[in-house]
Image (tube, rainbow, N blue to C red):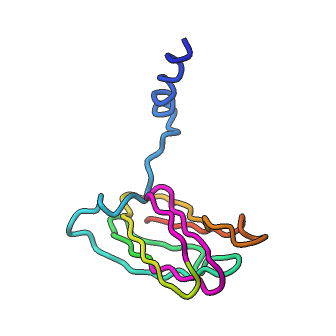
Amino acid sequence: MRQCLIGLIPVLLALSGCAAQHALVAASAAPADAPAKTLTIIARKYHFTPKEIVVKRGTLVRLTLKSEDVTHGFALKSAGINVKLPPGQTVEVTFYASQRGEEGFACSNFCGIGHLAMDGRIIVQ
């Protein structure tokens, strides 16, 4: 009985609308002719600058990430991205804005007392 109920969970989520599709996905999902946009995000205790990014649907987004103080992280779960940002180094990540919506990103490397508030969002129009 328990196995039957567990098997029903994905079906129930899909029917309820809770199994939402993500606006941001892996870069490999982008068509070859997708327009590209490059943006920079700076990580600093305890915030990202900018905290909010707006991109157009159908764009291949390249983020240049830099930490100015300590090792931070950058996690964008829907696109399968989770990288460390060592101070003074540049890390690049790429993802595809497949549909309209919003996705959150966060620091994924504990950086101090304000770590839990270190987040932002990407809006796809």
Q: Indicate whether residue 97 is drawn in magenta.
A: no
Q: Residue furthest right?
A: 113
Quadrant position of the C terminus in the picture = bottom left
Q: Is the residue 58 above or below the residue 40 in the image?
A: above
**Residue 86: percent from the left, percent from the top?**
56, 79
Q: Indicate whether residue 79 is drawn in magenta.
A: yes
Quadrant position of the N terminus in the picture = top right
Q: Is the residue 8 above or below the residue 111 in the image?
A: above
Write down the region rendered in magenta.
64-85
Residue at 36%, 64% in the rendered image: 96
- Residues 5 and 73: in front is 73
- Residues 17 and 2: in front is 2
Residue at 70%, 76% in the rendered image: 46
Residue at 38%, 70% in the rendered image: 94
**Residue 61: percent from the left, percent from the top?**
38, 72
Asked if residue 55 lies left or right of residue 70, the reply is left
Q: Give the quarter of the image for residue 29.
A: bottom left
Q: Main secondary structure of the magenta part?
A: strand
Asked if residue 19 lies left or right of residue 51, the reply is left
Q: Is the residue 118 above or below the residue 65 in the image?
A: above
**Residue 87: percent from the left, percent from the top?**
59, 84
Q: Is the residue 62 above or below the residue 116 in the image?
A: below
